Image (cartoon, grey):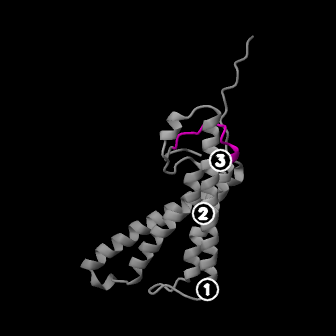
Amino acid sequence: MTTRPEPDRQWREPRVLRVWAAGELWIACLALTTIFVSVLWQVISRYVPALNWPGVSELANYSLIVLTFIMVGYLIGNNGHITIQVIDYLVKGRAFVVVKAVSAAVTGLICAVLVWEAWKLIQAYPTRTTAALGIPIWTLYAIPMLGFASGTVRAFVRVFTANRDDVPFDAAEAR
């Protein structure tokens, strides 16, 4: 009896990063739903003035900010970020691994600097609030800080896994 060789198993992120990614996706879905409901509320309130609420516009705007920044780490970790693939087609072998590692390191460094900047903004404005909803401004800076911290971790993970094949990004993936 012959045994089949095991199919080539692709590298998977550690469980903690997969759970973190699921949390990022959940927050992104919540932000997207909030944007949809807020915009729908604004449209309806044009025809039903009693439903007019000044905070709904602010809620939609800040939900877009949350959606944008919370997905940074997820997209970096899952090869879903924007890349220029000209070099990918020209460079082969070890040089390609070096290009992937260096680009991941630069991405991680940039994300780390942005984490630092977000932290400094949190410290600079600890008591300010938004106009309509009264949300503390520091919480709005905390979202990008978390997103870029996630991006930093995932980019440096990609530095150490640069010698592995990239899995094509699939937005409809089942985890």
Where is residue 15 drawn, in percent x and y? 71, 50
**Considering only order in the chain, which callout, 2 or 1, is on the residue closer to the N terminus?**
1
**Considering only order in the chain, which callout, 1 or 3, is on the residue closer to the N terminus?**
1
Q: CA distance from mark 1 to mark 2?
A: 20 Å
Tag 1 near tag 2, CB within 8 Å:
no
30 drawn magenta? no
**Outermost residue to the right:** 1
Q: The magenta stretch spans which residues?
A: 159-169
What's the residue at 67%, 32% (across, down)? 9
The amino acid type found where label 1 is placed reads: Pro
What's the residue at 52%, 49% (across, down)? 80
Q: Is residue 122 above or below residue 91?
A: below
The image quadrant of residue 44 is: bottom left
Where is residue 42 drawn, in percent x and y? 33, 75
Mark sitting on residue 1:
none
The amino acid type found where label 2 is placed reads: Phe
The amino acid type found where label 3 is placed reads: Arg
166 drawn magenta? yes
Q: Is residue 64 above or below residue 59?
A: above
Mark sitting on residue 126:
1
Q: Nearer the viewer, residue 172 or 101?
A: 101
Disc 3 is placed on an element classified as helix
The image quadrant of residue 1 is: top right
Disc 1 is placed on an element classified as loop
What residue is shown with label 3? Answer: 158
Tag 3 near tag 2, CB within 8 Å:
no
Where is residue 21 drawn, in percent x and y? 61, 55
What residue is shown with label 2? Answer: 148
Q: CA distance from mark 3 to mark 2?
A: 15 Å
What's the residue at 44%, 86% (across, down)? 132
Q: Nearer the viewer, residue 175 or 118?
A: 118
**Considering only order in the chain, which callout, 2 or 3, is on the residue closer to the N terminus?**
2
